[in-house]
Amino acid sequence: MDKIWLKHYPPGVPAEINPDAIPAVVDLFEASVRDFADRPAFANMGTTLSYTELDRESKRFAAYLQTQLGLKKGDRVALMMPNVLQYPVALFGVLRAGLVVVNVNPLYTPRELKHQLADSGAQAIVIVENFAHTLAEVIAETPVKHVLLTQLGDMLPFVKRHLVNLVVKYVKKMVPAFHLPQAVNFLDALAQGNERSYTRPSLTGDDIAFLQYTGGTTGVSKGAVLTHRNMVANVLQAQAWIGTILEKGREIVITALPLYHIFSLTANCMVFMREGGLNYLITNPRDMKGFVKELQGLKFTAVTGVNTLFNGLLNTPGFAELDFSALKLTLGGGMAVQEAVAMRWQQVTGKPLLEAYGLTETSPAACINPMNLKSYNGTIGLPISSTEVSIQNDDCQELSIGEAGEICVRGPQVMRGYWNRPDETAKVIDSNGWLHTGDIGIMDDQGYVKIVDRKKDMILVSGFNVYPNEIEGVVAMHPGVLEVAAVGVPHAESGEIVKIFVVKKDPKLTAEALIAHCRENLTGYKIPKQVEFRDSLPKTNVGKILRRELRA
């Protein structure tokens, strides 16, 4: 295939990276703590961990896992926490012990948690006590033998730690009752690890680093097997791309997406650690007023997130008055960035909102827009270094420039497969190594890729394909709209018609006004025939709108 995108790479971005230049994520981590020892690594609730402190605490935890719990290389450890300082300590402790991280959404139901723990075979779990009641319901039906229990404030200074933990538990009553008699306190585990010796394991790129679960919104979640080579490759790819505008040891990235999510895990935690940056952790980004308050007086240089996060910030009082003078990079992914949101972001911050694209199965980055882009361009960017993108039809044949088909990705960041699911793996990775993403897109003559939509979300109106992203983008342009989702609903004459679910920004907004707005911007068969107003739209924990629930 002709890699037409290479001709349009920004200056300084290589066509290829060497995914074997660094053997494992642990080597990447050790290089960062050596190079940026005294620099701040993670901050949360007014407390900062330096790279040296993160090195010390994670090594203690690794020693505890190896000696006290007797876990062996390749054993799985689940992490069930929001963005708190315990997360990076546990994350790098698990990896440094030669173990496999199983990231778990803290908002899982008992059924979902049971499935993931059983499917992964996790022997241990680190969990914030706010969610321990969920674990207590199902732990007897899982392979979990060891529970490490922590409170939200455990990594804060002594007085603040006890104050935060008391308020969370007894004032806000955020900790439902639970019974886990086998649980060990996380801080006690660190103290015990301090008395033990740590043995650095021998790790190669082929060893598994993460079982990253995906697909839970469309069916039973599957564990994407991400090796150390997959993760290192994607860190080097993303660093080659965005590192052209970053200054080592000087960056502050706002980490509002949870670190257990692959986007935040790689882009924020790993890439900015490689750059010696500071990850400023937001524990509860849904509290938009509190979020904006935390940003006051902070000279942040980068923000990553999903469209709903950016939209929420833009509609929160006080956000527009923040200091954006140091902001270099705003990166949107995880779902389509709407033009209306991107345009307003640039108006408010003075900086463009750049869209990127990836999947859990690609660790996650596959395409990113150039850092020298002046404004939103409606694409997900160019294939990044050492990455091939092919637009293919249902017969796996490559389509011509401008033709819509399935986006397929090949590169060193593509997962090994789904954990214990060779049948599911065979459905998405073909014999030529192409990962079939399930996303419909086109490539232009410069190599820029534009997502049209998900295969399964496509609406068929009288034989014409209608893509919800396009409808949502148009509706979102109306000044009276806060959020929107478009789905197809059955219709006797046309097969399906378009229905939109809208959250109002203007209480006076009417369905008739929205239809008239769409009529000005969409061809006839794309115009929504039904409008339903709602107070909110169903979303995943990282802010993706769940069209499936709306269809149901």
Image (tube, grey):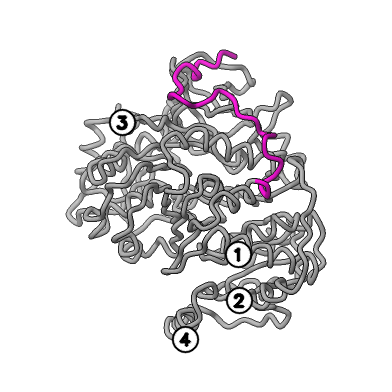
Going by the numbered disc 4, the residue's amino acid type is Tyr
Asked whether the beta carbons under mark 4 and mark 3 sit within 8 Å of each other, the answer is: no
Please tell me which residue is depicted at 63% across the width and 46% down the height of the picture: 28
Q: Which residue is mark 3?
A: 374
Q: Identify the disc placed on residue 133.
A: 2
- Which of discs 2 and 3 lies nearer the camera? The answer is 3
Q: Circle 1 sits on which residue?
A: 80
Disc with the residue nearer the chain's start (4 vs 3): 4
Question: Is tag 2's residue or tag 3's residue first in the polypeptide sequence?
Answer: 2
Q: Which mark is residue 125?
A: none
Label 4 or label 2, whichever comes before in sequence order: 2
Q: Tell which circle, 2 or 1, labels the residue nearer the N-terminal end.
A: 1
Residue 22 falls within the magenta-colored stretch = yes
- Looking at the rendering, the stretch of residues picked out in magenta corresponds to 1-27
Q: What secondary structure characterizes most of the magenta part? A: loop
Q: Of helix, strand and loop, which one carries label 4?
A: helix
State the mark number for residue 170.
Answer: 4
Q: Please report whichever mark, 4 or 1, sits nearer to the chain's N-terminal start.
A: 1
> In what quadrant of the picture does the N terminus appear?
top right
User: Do labels 2 and 3 touch, CB within 8 Å?
Assistant: no
The kind of residue on which mark 1 rests is Met
Mark whose residue sits in front, 2 or 1: 1
For the point 47% across and 83% down, which residue is it?
Answer: 159
Residue drawn 74% across and 66% down?
Answer: 63
Q: Secondary structure at mark 2?
A: helix
> In front: mark 3 or mark 1?
3
Q: Nearer the viewer, residue 300 or 121?
A: 300
Three-letter code, disc 3: Lys
